[in-house]
Amino acid sequence: MEEKKSLWKRITGSREASLVLILVVMLILVECIQYFGGNGHFLSPTNIGQIFRNNALTMLMALGMLCVLLTAGIDISITSTLAFAGMIVGMLQKNDVCHNTFLLFLIAALIGLACGFLNGLIIAKGHIAPIIVTMGFMYIWRGLAYVVSGNQWASGADVAQFAEFGKDGSAGPYIILIAAYVIFFIVLKWTTYGRRIYAVGSNMEAASVSGINVDKILVSVYMIMGLLAGLSGALSVSIYASAQPNMQYGKEMDVIAACVIGGVSMNGGRGSVVGTFLGALFYAVLAKALPLVGLDSIWQNLIKGIVVLAVVLINTLTQRAMDRAALERREM
């Protein structure tokens, strides 16, 4: 009994463990509904591959949003940055300026980096609320995407060579995702820079007093977010074999939701790469499962909202239990 109790405490005492448990339960339920409904297996290799491929952009940008949220900031301009960078990549190919895959990803990344730098610079030096700054740039970058397009779009024929990298069955998107998550896990867990990000989000004034250049950290996290949004713009063109100025419109909320589900605090200083991955995976599985279980599109957003709120509530209760346990240990 004691062993079972301690195991349960270990599960409920960790945000990541509790999210894994919820994810497993959801997968079992969906698999049963799908299988007994005569529609095959939900957990087939094809479905799993599609879940990761179709949500690669959200999963990639969630890493940048994690860094921004850890500093108690937010960036709602990310999908506009994605569209701006992606549109430039598309038009470069449409006009036969560049067709080199590596160079196109590099150009998109640099564009995103510049967008993120402007976001971070104004937030850090102007001391303006991140949501206001990024809301302004959300309209600017999306508007520039339309300007770059010139009322045109890059079709599958225009980006045919580039689309080979992200086509169905290609390892390209998975390589980028794995590399990004490994790098961010190492940086945030074991480097001085990672610890400084957490310190700034936990207490900005204390971090400044301790010698951390707060402005530099703030600018850098928005640059990271911009870099990943730019890369996602190029990846979007490659995966969907087209470039349009309205691509991924409104999807920034999916990225934020993935982080929050994963236990990232919007007050800063709390969150992890593992939790972010699990949150993004949970959101991706939910988005894939709802249509397959026969729910009408009208109900899908409603159910999605309810499930997201329930998971966030569980995460919040788990965190409070962890905080109480830590306090009890200090008092002993």
Image (cartoon, grey):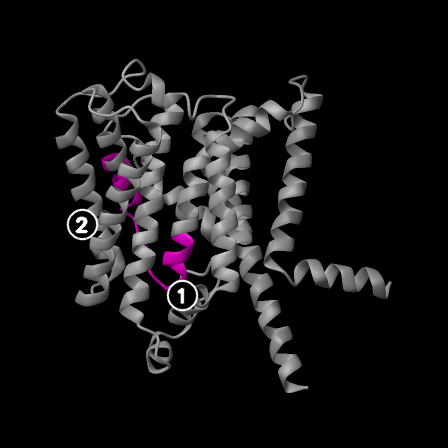
Q: Nearer the viewer, residue 40 or 91?
A: 91
Front disc: 2 or 1: 1
Furthest-top residue in view? Answer: 157
Residues shaded magenta: 65-84
Q: Picture quarter containing residue 216? A: bottom left
Q: Picture quarter containing residue 321? A: bottom right
Query: What residue does disc 2 label?
Result: 136
**Label 2 crowd bin: few (<14), some (14–19), many (20+), radius 10 Å:** some
Q: Nearer the viewer, residue 7 or 153?
A: 153
Q: Amino acid at mark 1?
A: Ile
Residue 18 appears in the figure? yes
How far across and how far down the image is residue 283, in percent? 50, 40
- Magenta segment: does it hold 75? yes
- Magenta segment: does it hold 183? no
Query: What residue does disc 1 label?
Result: 197
- Quadrant where the C terminus is found in the figure: bottom right
Which residue appears at 60% of the width and 62% of the height? 318
Residue 67 vertical position relative to residue 93 in the rendered view, above or below? below
Q: Are marks 2 and 1 in contact (CB under 8 Å)?
A: no
How far across and how far down the image is residue 231, in percent? 34, 39
Q: Main secondary structure of the magenta part?
A: helix
Q: Secondary structure at mark 2?
A: helix
Q: CA distance from mark 2 to mark 1?
A: 25 Å
Of callouts 2 and 1, which one flags the residue occurring earlier in the amino acid sequence? 2
Which residue appears at 25% of the width and 20% of the height? 154
Residue 169 vertical position relative to residue 307 in the rendered view, above or below? above
Q: Nearer the viewer, residue 246 or 95?
A: 95
Decide if residue 57 is on the left or right side of residue 9: left
How far across and how far down the image is residue 319, in percent? 56, 64
